[in-house]
Amino acid sequence: MNKLKVEIYGESHAGKIGVILGGIPVGSSIDTLKIDEMLARRGASNTPWSTPRKEKDEVVFLRGIENGKVSGEIEAVIYNKNTRPQDYTNVKVVPRPSHADFVSYVKYGVIPSGGGKWSGRMTAPLCIAGAVAKDLLERENIKIGAYISSIGSINGKSYKNSQISVEEIEACHKELLPTLSNSQEMTSEVMEAKANGDSIGGTIECIVYGLPIGLGDNLFEGMESAISHSVFAVPGVKGIEFGSGFDITKMNGSVANDGFAVEGNKVITLTNNSGGINGGLTNGMPLTLRVALRPTPSIAVEQDSVNLATMTNEKVVVKGRHDSCIVPRAVAAIESAVAIAVYDKYLEYKGE
């Protein structure tokens, strides 16, 4: 990031987790209720697919906010109150498959409780920063909305085949499962995996409305690069595509190209296969992207692993409290990650 500074610290079972957020223009108003709303969406408490671990996620601002306005570099923390590191005593030298346990042990000599700094718990401070960025963008009439587009084999409504309004997305955030269609079928898919002690993944789509033409640049400074860099901060993300994404490989150029037209006093594209981005720069159309999230690696099914102390093969059953599907809670995290990247580019565009 060129204008914003976002530094996240802490661990899943540490005393606190937090974020340092710099680069926001001094004097900007901060609506803390928007932060609470984003964290509540990420928490998704009392849902049948989420972890039994309950945290209130009360945000404490240590510095940078005075009378509701930014006075300098912001630091915000959440104190963890429901930690149970004892749940992970059986994996101190036996890495959980597809977690960061093994690589952490090799690099740092330790397997941290509950995933440590690699845990999905770390998306809470990410959502603090994302809620601030999203709120400030909305004051500039730029709106961001994310929703579930698929879980397992069940597909929901997608920007690829439908016109989707920001109001429609905001409405789905009030539902137990934030999707635009096929909620019951998706829920059944999740509950079947949970009943088997297993997990399941899915995809999340995100749309950015109201962007001016010219945010971003070429090569490493392009919008795709910036957003991808930010989105991969969300644990469990394994892929990202913009516009028609990989489906564009099946098209001829005559179909894939977005033709131009004049509408009123502005230039638009007749299709949006490019996802609102040309050459790394926004073109004024809605910016569209889809993100793939893997199934939660922590499952109750017995799995193959190794004992790193004895260097022998060993079976492992993961204990602790985990989501059977992280996709519903990840909607807020993806929205936050996109907002951070877009706001950084917007500050650059405005010359802040």
Image (cartoon, rainbow, N blue to C red):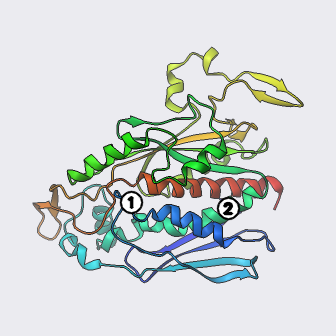
Instruction: Give the answer, above or below, for where 88 lies relative to 261.
Output: below
> How many numbered marks, from 0 up?
2
Q: Which quadrant, please, contains the N terminus?
A: bottom right
Identify the secondary structure beneath mark 1: loop
Identify the secondary structure beneath mark 2: helix
Q: Percent from the top left, x then y, of residue 36?
A: 58, 70
Q: Which mark is residue 328?
A: none
Give the image quarter of residue 106: bottom left
The amino acid sitting under disc 2 is Ala
Instruction: Give the answer, above or below, for where 203 lies relative to 302.
Output: above
Instruction: Residue at 24%, 79% (x, y): give it.
Output: 86
Q: Nearer the viewer, mark 2 or mark 1?
A: 1
- Depth check: 175 or 15 in front? 175
Instruction: Residue at 29%, 71% (x, y): give it.
Output: 111
Between disc 2 and disc 1, whose residue precedes? 1
Distance between the Cα atoms at labels 2 and 1? 27 Å
Q: Percent from the top left, x then y, of residue 167?
A: 66, 46
Check disc 1 and report the residue beneath it: 47
Give the image quarter of residue 189: top left
| Residue 239 showing in the rendered view | yes
The amino acid sitting under disc 1 is Thr
Q: Percent from the top left, x then y, of residue 194?
A: 26, 53
* Labelled pair 2, 1 in contact (Cβ < 8 Å): no
Badge 1, how many Cα within 10 Å: few under 14, some, many 20+?
few
Check disc 2 and report the residue beneath it: 133
| Residue 112 showing in the rendered view | no
